[in-house]
Amino acid sequence: MQIREANIKDFEGIKSLYLQAFDNLEGDLVSNLAINLLDEESIIKIISLVAINNNVIIGHIAFSPVFLESINEHFGYILAPLAVLPTDQKKGIGFTLVKSGLDTISSLGSFLVFVYGDPRYYSRFGFKTNLAQNFTPPHTLQYPEGWHAMKLNSTVFPQGGKLKCVNSLNDSRLW
Ligand SMILES: CC(C)(COP(=O)(O)OP(=O)(O)OC[C@H]1O[C@@H](n2cnc3c(N)ncnc32)[C@H](O)[C@@H]1OP(=O)(O)O)[C@@H](O)C(=O)NCCC(=O)NCCS
């Protein structure tokens, strides 16, 4: 298996992956998010990685920048979305994708990384709910218990505030 940066030519493979990994309604929404992130132009680069096996995309992850709305300061990223093909799940591919993305961000500096997802999955990477609680997501969360953050590299971070995200994620149905 190889992990590499995704590009616009991966469009079909990424779409197909999300349609298989999620059920119908969510599949459309989340595959559109993954594809929109591929070509969204953001001041801070969006990180999008694919896992490839035998020329087939079997996993994908994206991290996009988040900003403090009040001062437009970039201080973090949000992990979304993430999926592994159902036939390739439970082989550590999701773990490798998350770790690769966190390593990439860590090499760029000190950041807070947010994720909105299942605590049972994301706690293994060091994501914590208490670190996220003072940061208000761009939209109201359906499952507030899924809102997490972790620190990459030690520095002084903002203590809280309202987050602004990239356009592709700025859709209340995703939160
Ligand atoms: C979540 C997902 C990306 C994990 O990928 P993966 O390659 O199977 O992950 P890993 O092999 O690294 O880890 C598998 C472990 O995570 C667990 N796991 C998977 N999804 C989980 C979830 N939602 N909650 C808790 N644990 C979960 C598995 O049970 C397995 O546990 P084990 O190690 O005790 O056997 C994959 O299951 C997936 O694509 N699911 C559908 C889409 C999705 O839910 N995406 C995440 C949105 S937040």
Image (cartoon, rainbow, N blue to C red):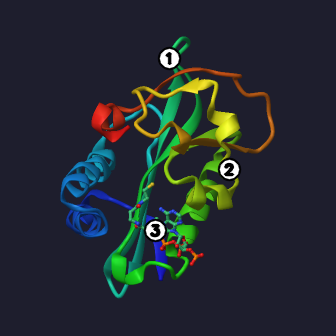
> How many numbered dots are placed on residues in this image?
3
Nearest to N terminus: mark 1 or mark 2: 1
Residue pointed to by mark 1: 69
Nearest the viewer among 161 and 58 is 161
- Whether disc 3's CB lies below 8 Å from ligand 1 is answered no
Reading the image, the residue beneath label 2 is 106
Which mark is first along the chain, 3 or 2?
Answer: 3
Q: Is residue 141 above or below residue 117?
A: above
Mark 3 residue element: strand
Q: Residue at x 26, y 52 (%)?
A: 35
Query: Of all residues shown, which one is farthest toward the top?
Result: 70
Q: Which residue is drawn at 46% across and 68% down?
A: 4
Give the image location of residue 130, x and y in percent: 69, 36
Secondary structure at badge 1 equals loop
| Amino acid type, mark 2 | Ser
Decide if residue 171 is in sight here: no
Q: Are marks 2 and 3 in contact (CB under 8 Å)?
A: no
Residue 22 x %, y %: 29, 63
Q: In which quarter of the image is the C terminus?
A: top left
The disc, 3 or 1, on the residue closer to the chain's N-terminal end is: 3
Q: Which amino acid does label 1 sit on?
A: Glu
Residue 124 is left or right of residue 39, and the answer is right
Q: Do the residues labelled 3 and 1 touch (CB within 8 Å)?
A: no
Tell me if mark 2 has few (under 14), some (14-19) or many (20+) residues whose alpha carbon lies within 10 angstroms of its own: some
Q: Name the residue under label 3.
A: 4
